[in-house]
Amino acid sequence: MLESVRFRLTLWYTAVLALVLVVLSMAAYFVLRQSTLQGTDSSLTEIADAFLTTLQAELKDQSGPNALQLAAEQALFEHRYRDNLFVILDPRGNVVITSEDLPVPNQPAKSHAAGIFASGAFRKLAEASLHGDRFFQNVPGGPDGYRGFVRQFPVNGQGHILIVLQSLHRQAELLKEIARTFAWVIPIAVLLACAGGYFLARKSLAPVVDMATQAGRIGAENLHERLAVRNRKDELGHLALAFNSLLDRLNLSFERQRRFMADASHELRTPVAILRGEADVALSQPSRTLEEYRESLLLLRDEAERLTHIVEDLFTLARADAGQYPLTRSDFYLDELVADCTRNTRTLALAKRITLAVDAPAELPLHADEGLLRRMFLNLLDNAIKYTPEGGRVAVSCCRAGAEYAVSITDTGPGIPAELQPRIFERFFRADEARSRGEKDGGGAGLGLSISRWIAEAHQGRLELTRSDSSGSTFTAFLPAPAAGAPSPVR
Ligand code: ADP
């Protein structure tokens, strides 16, 4: 049950709400208690003031030794409140009169009065009045205790003491009632919130459950299916859109893989068919001349070589795609590498009477994978010679251009039609099937440029067809150059 998000959400929500309710009700309870106490205190002050005003007025009408007692009796009659007890003490602390002494019983308070006047708290209250003018203190007694107020007042120039006690029963009853109300209202509110929270969590998570079910149904065979997006603007809509875009990318990558496999098997089928056909022809007759066998074997070897190249290229691309082609970097001079590659293709160029020119004036130190860069330059040079007619020219130049090196290979071939130029870096793409597949010039499978571009990009560089028209083509590889001042390799 705890595994369910719905349940956990509800639990959290309920716990937080319960905590908030409890804290709020406790705060409300304490604020209320404080304000009733303050109310009691100010009512006590008012009662005392009113009583003393009456007492002073009565004193004016009285004379003789019992004047204070008589006046107090009169004042007590006038201020007989149900929940109040009055005590008047002389300057020495002796009781002059209490509301208990009145002939009319003072109702419920009266029954507790004797105990209260005898209590230690009451005596402390009386003593405190000797040190200060006004003083409040709780005094135990009765069902919920009393709030006591004491103050001094002058009679014939002598400080007497008035103590007024007010029962806290009504306030305590009110607070108890409030506490009782909180005690049943809070659990009910929490229960209702729990049910509502569960309902809401269920309702808002229902689309997620739907999405999970839909996503569970999507596999390699129906990768084109997508999750339904109810509201593109809310979080769940974003989730569904993100999932769908992931499926788009997966689908694209699956498609690419599928096409790659289909193209690769198509490319492999031709040389394999040639191998088989030639072997069948060679074996079809019981005896052939040595020359005929030699010719067949040469053809088989050429075809096997072509097959090896294709398989190697496919393997390189597969490893590159899987991100498993680590670069083995070393320090060398780019100009030397370019000159070396050009030298290696000289025989090919000579066979077609093509002039090969290299222009690498400066020293260009580089820290890169020499083997891979050699492969890229040989591919480009090979293409340049392959697609340039006899007697043409292939020029190689390399120089530093700002923060990068630019190596350009320019030929005087027929160029690549403008509409095909954007596609030449695609895998298995050949601008002119018949020509590039020619067996004599070792026609490739249309993978050379894709691999070359990957090599440039693996070095954080790029490979571009910078110019191609009827007078020829220029391919330029841009490679990041080391910062000025970096140590150069030893020549
Ligand atoms: P291929 O193995 O067929 O040469 P590439 O990937 O190296 O494959 O080249 C892709 C296609 O680009 C080639 O089939 C060819 O049509 C075109 N191409 C490449 N280099 C040149 C060039 N220097 N001149 C003209 N066309 C070229």
Image: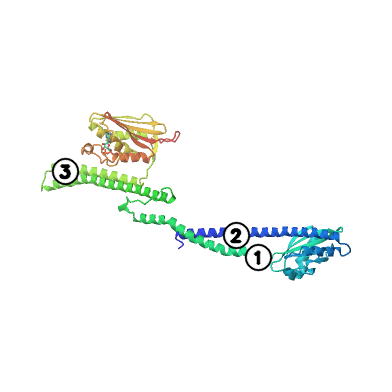
Q: Residue 25 carries which label?
A: 2
Seen from the viewer's position, the closer of residues 162 and 67 is: 67
Position of the N terminus by quadrant: bottom left
Q: Residue 298: horizontal and vertical position, in percent?
A: 18, 42
Q: Which structural element holds mark 3?
A: helix
Q: In which quarter of the image is residue 369?
A: top left
Q: Which of label 3 and label 1 is nearer to you? A: 1
Asked if residue 482 lies left or right of residue 129, the reply is left
Q: Which residue is drawn at 37% across and 51% down?
A: 228
Distance from label 2 to label 3 (Cα)?
A: 101 Å
Q: Which of label 2 and label 3 is nearer to you? A: 2
Seen from the viewer's position, the closer of residues 311 and 345 is: 311
Tag 3: residue type? Ser
Q: Residue 296 carries which label?
A: 3
For label 1, the residue is: 173
Q: Residue 271: horizontal and vertical position, in percent?
A: 21, 44
Say which label, 3 or 1, has the lower sequence index: 1
Mark 1 vs ligand 1: CB below 8 Å: no
Q: Let me know if residue 192 appears in the view.
A: yes
Tag 1: residue type? Glu
